[in-house]
Image (cartoon, rainbow, N blue to C red):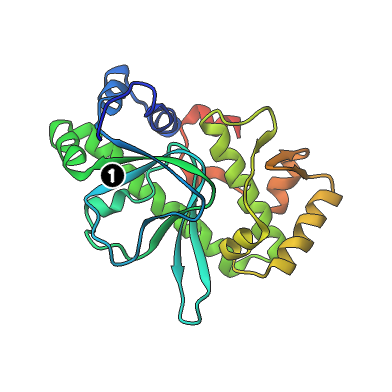
Amino acid sequence: MAYRSTDALAPLVVRLRAVVHLTDKEAEIIRALPFTVREVKAGWEIVREGDRPSQSCLILDGVSCRFKIVGDGGRQIVSVHIPGDLPDLQSFHLKTMDHNLATLTPSRIGLIPHSAIHHLMMSSPRMANILAREGLIDGSIFREWICNIGRRPALTRVAHFLCEIFVRYRLIGANDGMTIPFAFTQTELADAQGTSTVHINRVLKVLKTDGMISIAGKALTVHDWEKLQETGDFDARYLHLSEAEAAAV
């Protein structure tokens, strides 16, 4: 059942404010969107390739990924999504899904009807521009991922990914100092980085041994941020952060 809550959509408001100036009135418009909440287990398919969804998904809690299955059955993760992300907003314009979207952890998601998104965009040209900008930033991240997987060695690739996910968690206030949630398995990291679990294991050992990171349970702590950025050839410009957030990276 669809309902409204001033708190449930807070992750989206927080994340948008990290990349664009959002007035209090605009934040309230977003919070007024109707949505249906679902609590789902890890591995739950939100939408499948070939589906024609009538709603878009907002990650409220947990981690999800977009992925493609290739001819030999292998999985390539093409993006990961944390609270505040709208991973399938493009389904509002592109009616047939060309990839899959599934949860990696137990998650809580909000399903926003396309009719509500249409009404929002028609009633507020500025909100339409903000949502369009989301799609452009999405494309920017895809370009960086292509460069990362296609041209960087495994150590740089993984360090870059860790830098990105650290910044994104920090943007929504999900960090505890230099520690962030980190529920990715080595198989998931391998599928996201286009390499093997053996390479992932070796690379993580190097990053830990060199004092850049540590992983305990489902949390990652960055001990040497400057060195991790340098190792990962990381420049946050492709995330198109607000001036204040960019200065803090």
Lateral position of residue 27 relative to residue 155, left or right: left
Q: Residue at x 48, y 42 (%)?
A: 107
- Is residue 106 shown above or below 249? below
Q: Is residue 203 left or right of residue 113?
A: right
Give the structural element (helix, strand or loop) at label 1. helix
Image: 154 above or below 111: below
Mark 1 crowdedness (10 Å alpha carbons): few <14, some 14-19, many ≥20: some
Indicate the quadrant where residue 205 lies: bottom right
* Quarter containing the N terminus: top left
Residue 56, position as x, y percentages in the image: 29, 46
The spot of residue 234 in percent (x, y) is 62, 49
Q: Position of residue 243 (x, y in %)?
A: 48, 30
Q: Is residue 214 above or below residue 127?
A: below
Three-letter code, disc 1: Ala
In what quadrant of the picture does the C terminus appear?
Answer: top right
Q: Which residue is mark 1?
A: 132
For the view shown, which residue lies furthest in the right direction? 209
As drawn, 172 above or below 192: above
